[in-house]
Amino acid sequence: MKIGFIGAGKMAQALVRGMLASGRFSPECLIASSPKRDEPLLNDMKKLGIQTTNDNVEVTHKSDVIFLAVKPPLVRTVAAEVAPSLSKDKLVVSIALGITIRSIESLLPTKARVVRVMPNTPAVVRAGASAYSIGSACHEGDSDIVYDILSTVGYAVEVPESLVDPVTGLSGSGPSYMFCAIEALSDGGVKMGLPRALALKLAAHTLLGAAKMVLETGQHPAALKDDVQSPSGSSIYAMHHLEKSAFRGILIDAVEAACNRSKDTG
Ligand code: NAD
């Protein structure tokens, strides 16, 4: 199976790097395009050993699965550009924020097979989280094709399309909130006397460990939180501060804001 990427930016590169690291895909299976003005991005892809081009139509010709990995306002232009070269044996996978399957289908030949995915950048280290929805003209087996690709770079799950905007608010944009949390935790460590490098490592491992415990123990996060908080201990004192500053409310607001932004983009 040949996989093409139209767009060679941050998200396409995260997917390509993760897919290559998985060992399931060799560089010869992959091709990416972007305009000449963005040659440095294509050069990054070239260094990974994959084929590159400035011609989006070449990507569709040479690929069985074509990822549309351009910014949302460009999806319509790019879809219209490649539409004449799309035969029925091609699967189109859009990763664009907010753009519905129906709007992509409307730009492609009738019965075009379209899938909408919301991935995230931790795909680069094969710890991504992707949710995807299957278009009306997809064949039996298309969901498995997309699952097989996305599961090489992390967790993958099929969802109804109505859930893709909420997924964007949570896991699509979520890495940025968590990078900010890691930075802020390490600032706290530095304020209290830890060297920066040590603080950063401890902060990142703390989030990684907490996430692994949720996934591997299957316990509710509230129960895991309670286990850390001994009577009159340091954690409950810290928790009181977080609650006074509406820690949970702020995170809920963030997911809601990103979800609504995704809906507005469409
Ligand atoms: P980016 O700006 O890093 O990359 C965009 C790419 O599109 C660049 O390589 C650019 O050269 C290329 N491009 C521009 N015009 C083009 C054209 N006419 N033909 C072909 N390529 C063209 O953006 P990104 O962050 O990688 O986002 C790409 C898509 O992925 C967006 O639709 C975004 O919503 C989605 N997405 C991004 C993230 C993320 O964390 N960055 C997460 C989930 C989904």
Image (cartoon, helix red, strand yellow):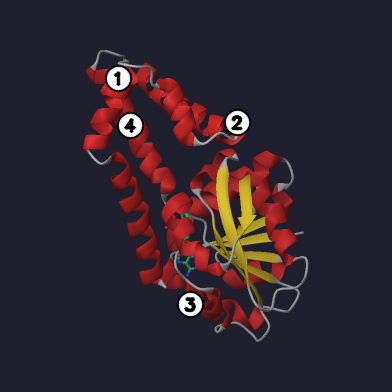
Would you name the residue on which mark 1 appears? 189
Q: Secondary structure at mark 3?
A: helix
Q: Earlier in the sequence, mark 1 or mark 2?
A: 1
Would you name the residue on which mark 3 appears? 76
Query: How far is disc 3 from disc 4 in space, using C-alphas?
Result: 37 Å
Residue 107: x percent and y percent? 55, 83
Would you name the residue on which mark 4 appears? 183
CB under 8 Å between discs 2 and 3: no
Query: How far is disc 4 from disc 1 in space, using C-alphas?
Result: 10 Å
Query: How far is disc 2 from disc 3 in space, using C-alphas?
Result: 44 Å
Residue occupying image coordinates x 33% and y 21%: 235
Residue lying at the far front in this picture: please name it: 231
Vertical order, 254 against 54 (above or below): above
Vertical order, 89 against 8 (above or below): below
Q: Is residue 110 left or right of residue 120?
A: right
Kindly identify the amino acid type of the residue bearing the numbered disc 2.
Thr
Q: Nearer the viewer, mark 2 or mark 3?
A: 2
Residue 18, image quadrant: top right
